[in-house]
Amino acid sequence: MPRRPKTSHQSEKDDFGKKMLALQGTVPRGTLNFETGPDERGPALPPHLDQILDEIAQTLGAAPLSDEARTRLEPVLVAAVDTWRLEEEARAFLLRPHMLLDDATPFALASASPKGAERVLRILGRLKYGTAS
């Protein structure tokens, strides 16, 4: 039996599933509901949130963010805003050393490596759903 062409709804569901697999289920489903950016990397970061990344890097005295670090930090920032609901509180979380991260700041750990970003996303998911330990 020949396959039917995928509808746009099916295609959207497939794209969403791929994004969820790429993030290994560490980001709440609602966090990924932003429009996809022009380069199809994943959820597009609203422009004002993109500026927050630069401001946090400046606050920490870090070098300007590389594209790779920015790509890792974007879902972390979106998840932080989704969890804390206020940009100021999300920013404070990212700047404050966290005991589950060996007293590193979530921002520094997430920008350093993909595994660091995963650790921060797991903590944010636990905070959002009340299972932080």
Image: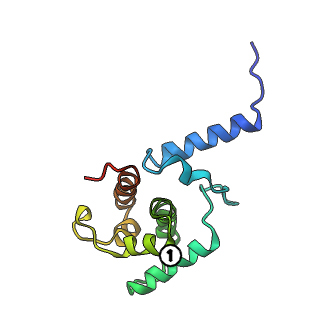
Q: Residues within 10 Å of mark 1 (few under 14, many from 20)?
A: many
As shown in the figure, which amino acid type bears the numbered disc 1?
Leu
Q: State the image coordinates of residue 64 (x, y, percent, origin top left).
A: 48, 82
Q: Indicate whether 132 appears above or below 49.
A: above
User: 82 above or below 108?
Assistant: above
Please indicate whether residue 4 sits to the left or right of residue 52 in the image. right
Q: Residue at x 49, y 42 (%)?
A: 21
Nearer to us in this view, 22 or 51 = 51
Where's residue 78, x and y in %?
A: 52, 62
Q: Give the SS element for disc 1.
A: helix
In which quadrant of the rendered image does the N terminus lie? top right
Q: Residue at x 41, y 69 (%)?
A: 111
Eyeballing the image, is 37 above or below 70? above
Residue 11 lies left or right of residue 115; in this view the side is right
Q: Residue at x 39, y 75 (%)?
A: 92
User: Which quadrant of the structure image shows residue 62?
Assistant: bottom left
- Find disc 1 in the rendering and name its residue: 53
The residue depicted at 47 percent of the width and 75 percent of the height is 88
